[in-house]
Amino acid sequence: MARIVMKFGGTSVADIARIRVVAQHVKREVDAGHEVAVVVSAMSGKTNELVAWTRDASPMHDAREYDAVVASGEQVTAGLLAIALQHIGIDARSWAGWQIPIRTDGAHGAARITDIDGSELVRRFGIGQVAVIAGFQGIGPDNRIATLGRGGSDTSAVAIAAAVKADRCDIYTDVDGVYTTDPRIEPKARRLNRVSFEEMLELASLGAKVLQVRSVELAMVHKVRTFVRSSFEDPNAPGMGDFDNPPGTLICDEDEIVEQQVVTGIAYARDEAQISLRRVSDRPGVAAGIFMPLAEANINVDMIVQNISEDGSRTDMTFTVPAGDLDKVRVVLEQIQKDIGIDTVQSESGMAKISVVGMGMRSHAGVAAAAFKALADRGINIRAITTSEIKISILIDAAYTELAVRTLHSVYGLDKQ
Amino acid sequence: MARIVMKFGGTSVADIARIRVVAQHVKREVDAGHEVAVVVSAMSGKTNELVAWTRDASPMHDAREYDAVVASGEQVTAGLLAIALQHIGIDARSWAGWQIPIRTDGAHGAARITDIDGSELVRRFGIGQVAVIAGFQGIGPDNRIATLGRGGSDTSAVAIAAAVKADRCDIYTDVDGVYTTDPRIEPKARRLNRVSFEEMLELASLGAKVLQVRSVELAMVHKVRTFVRSSFEDPNAPGMGDFDNPPGTLICDEDEIVEQQVVTGIAYARDEAQISLRRVSDRPGVAAGIFMPLAEANINVDMIVQNISEDGSRTDMTFTVPAGDLDKVRVVLEQIQKDIGIDTVQSESGMAKISVVGMGMRSHAGVAAAAFKALADRGINIRAITTSEIKISILIDAAYTELAVRTLHSVYGLDKQ
């Protein structure tokens, strides 16, 4: 017997028929003798509808009222799933965030969970009751509903799993796991059986949008074993109830991964824009003088590359942003160009970032070199490079995205079983 | 300066454009210096959608989960209206039932309000804040959301008005008041300036569906002056902000009605079915033996007529039910016919009930006789008659509904100013 938190996203609970399938997934685990808490998102499309209404009512709306409106979507799903579970003979009840309570800070619209009192949930596990919990929400210090920001139900699920000391947190979604790369680009992409928290963080933030980055961070901190699996498979297909090895990808501590791959996956992000600042005064505080104003304008700067200047007085600096933010960046840079001492600003959109991720990289030399050579062999020009302990990111023309992904996927042997 | 509770129903908050109009109605009262609490229903159609989902999930659903799902509609409207009010510079915040709290009994799906703590609302009136309250809901003894049953937002509004000792409760709806009869049938129908609680109870329960019966009962008990008025008029039209005499109908204690009319209004209910039980054993307990099983089958019996039997052993009994319930009634009667001793069951649908209502009836003789004569003059056959202190109800063939309504409206001089 184990304790499991199961999380189902918007497409998994899109209508009553899908909610019935979810109930069957839950029944399978209950019938196997497990203690189960379920975390649900709003039915797909509902959150967008509610958000659009708040914007329509006022573009500058009160985040506390936004939360009161938008949190209702998950409450509806939780009630409906509880009903569907009862209908097939399973003792279940729904919980809104304020009823548990899931306490958050006061940052309405993007709140962080500060504390979860799991005692009542655990008591009810003892009498065989399934808890169906509205995701994406808690209650703030002001006694009002606070939401965790988009995709926050993943975070709810992991936080609840930590609070009730669950053996595992199963994230059911519309894909059946985490792949070595996007199967739409490389049909030979393989599902990973296991991936470390650190690798998943890099893969998630780099465009393999299976899990919210924050939920992976939280899982890493609390060492919550998190399983990504599909809600669209037959709930009673062979192996689905196999506790030790169900179909999907386990995100876990690297200690649990016996044979580490040098490279685990190839991620990509299209629609990047590159900005190059030429002959910038090379003195302390310059980088802060550039990137602080960009942060204040809510521009999410991604790669940053700065070379050592030849003569110690002037340097070149390159960074990337989502292409949609390019106009905003230009406005900010115009305002600071003179004060900072930037000679020329060049920018170009239509870029893509390809990232090679793997824990094994730390102990293997030549991983980066292999990438550069493979891309060069294909005639793909490298615009910029950044590296971290377990990741190499390369900026290229977006036209070469698919070719680059397939090339790197093959170079590191990810095509092979 | 006064304290006002304003209630807006589903058609009044059907979309963001309508919610903006509601905000203007609220602004008018705030600008006039009044303290304001607003009670809102779900956007029209939303409650039906949510109810349909719970039914689809399971026909025999848990009423507590039904409440968790269905109460979300009002929470959405409350948040949206708070945003729309803030947008036009009015300090406002939304309140869910559990936040105030509005305490109810445990009858989920049809709960009764047991207590409202109005202290925080009153404190915030003092700092000029408008309270926007989700109608139709409270929190039960089990710490879960409990709804008051369909149309319960009227009841919420009146109960809150009583709790905060409001000077008036304004019910904004899609009609501009209570009329002497249905203007679609009798164009000469006039809007009543004032109507007593008792008269309104009879008019509401008889088909003039402006207000929930329960809310009128509550208003009568707590002597809450209740105003029925339109949310579809221009919020800033002349007279709309006239505190003492705005356009609409005031429902109040009869003491406030200086010149009482003999007859206040003519109500009607179509789609009635008549059931006559012939030669029923005339002994104690027979009526209970018939009407208890019907009540248990959730059949809403309306008129009941029983004559004194000729010989003291057998009697005839007639009652009416909504025509849609007739089949259910037949099933119940078949089961009890032998035990009770009913010789024959006759039934007929296609009936209508016409009711003449007025406080002045108590002190005026001949009101009933005038009705009977007027209907006879038109050749309308009377099937059954029941009377109360302030009401005469007459059952006729539904084909004569309009003619009977117009005839009675004219007989009692309601056509005239």
Image: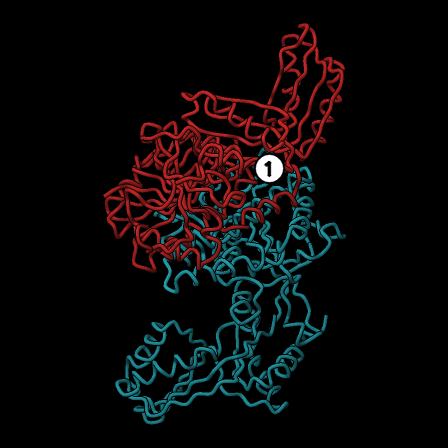
Chain colours: A cyan, B red
Rendered position, A130 above or below A374: above
Name the side, left or right, on which A381 lies relative to B235. Answer: right
Q: Which residue corresponds to the image point at 72% horizontal and 31% vertical from the top-left?
A: B327
Q: For residue B283, which quarter of the picture? A: top right
Q: Is residue B141 visible?
A: no
The residue indicated by pointer 1 is B401
Q: Secondary structure at mark 1?
A: helix
Q: Residue furthest front?
A: B377
Q: Which residue corresponds to the image point at 41% horizontal and 87% vertical from the top-left?
A: A276
In the rendering, at what x and y percent does residue B217 appear? 43, 29
| Label 1 packing within 10 angstroms: few (<14), some (14-19), many (20+) | many
Residue type marked 1: Thr
Q: Is A162 in front, or is B333? A: B333
Q: Is residue A397 visible?
A: yes
In the rendering, at what x and y percent does residue A300 appear? 42, 73
Q: Is A216 in front, or is B148? A: B148
